[in-house]
Amino acid sequence: MKLNAIIVEDEENSRLILRNYLTKYCPNISIQGEASNIEEALILIRNNDLDVVFLDVEMPYGNAFDLLDKVGDIDFETIFVTAYNHYAIDALNAHASYYLMKPISIDELIKAVDYVTEIKTKEDALQDQVLVPKTNAVNGKITLPQQDGFEVIETSDIMYCKADDNYTELYLSNNKKKLVSKTLKYIEESLSEGNFARVHKSYLVNVNEIVKYVKGKGGSVILSNGKEIMVSASKKSDLLSYFK
């Protein structure tokens, strides 16, 4: 997996060495920028979505721990890179992922990046388990993934769902629309415990919102908000089974 990173190091030659090593030996690291002091580092951290920060301890007008205190809520991994081993305990207390000694060993650098990659992979796997759309049979809710987390809505508030390539549009009873980065088939499976019928390859309908069925080869359904949706001939019997 790609990891967005910055290098925080006051010595230009040290930045150059680390950048070259990362570029050559750690291709999954994408360097978003470099900083030579705390203020430059703060700007980079606040303006980038970072996975890891390569951080020298001693810098002008402060040190790495001053920087981390200023950041506050840290959501990235930290790899300390320093010539001084007496900061190791402080680094551990600052929840450092790895502690690299200068001069940098290529093997140790690769090991550090592999370790952080493993951490982020596990985090993403856990997050994916939480953020996939899924229903709660007891409470009748569904979670919809978003960039900054997930939203929980009542399944009963969903009037119908419409396919949009690899996305799905969810139309709600309050006239709002939600776009989810999942296929309609995926949403259908997530709502399998509710009263939702696939009436067309592009539509999934909340059966409780149907107020009228219009006859035809497949026919069509009219929802409580007046929306009319065509029914595929192959889906007709499945739909009508809800009303027997």
Image (tube, rainbow, N blue to C red):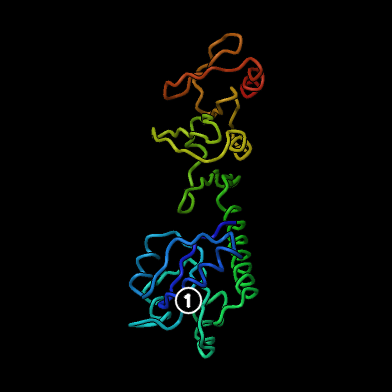
Residue at left 63%, top 37%?
A: 189
Where is residue 95? Give x, y as percent. Answer: 52, 77
Q: Position of residue 74 (x, y in %)?
A: 45, 69
Farthest-out residue, bottom = 86
Q: Relative to residue 200, is residue 138 depicted above or below?
A: below
Q: Position of residue 81 (x, y in %)?
A: 51, 78
- Left or right relative to 217: residue 10: left
Residue at the outermost top position: 216
Q: Is residue 57 above or below residue 203?
A: below
What is the quadrant of the N terminus in the image?
bottom right
- Which residue in the protein does label 1 denote? 14
| Observer-nearest of 7 and 154 | 7
- Name which residue lies at 60% across and 73% down: 109
- Between residue 233 and residue 2, name the one nearer to us: 2
Residue drawn where x is 62% and y is 56% of the image = 125
Mark 1 surroundings within 10 Å by alpha-carbon count, few (fewer than 14), some (14 through 19), many (20 or more): some
SS at circle 1: helix
- Residue 37 found in image quarter: bottom left
In percent of width and height, residue 12 lies at 42, 74
Quarter of the figure with the C terminus:
top right
Q: Which three-letter amino acid code belongs to the residue tagged 1?
A: Ser
Residue drawn where x is 54% and y is 30% of the image: 163
Q: Is residue 179 above or below residue 51?
A: above
Q: How many marks?
A: 1
Give the quadrant of residue 3: bottom right
Q: Is residue 142 above or below residue 225?
A: below
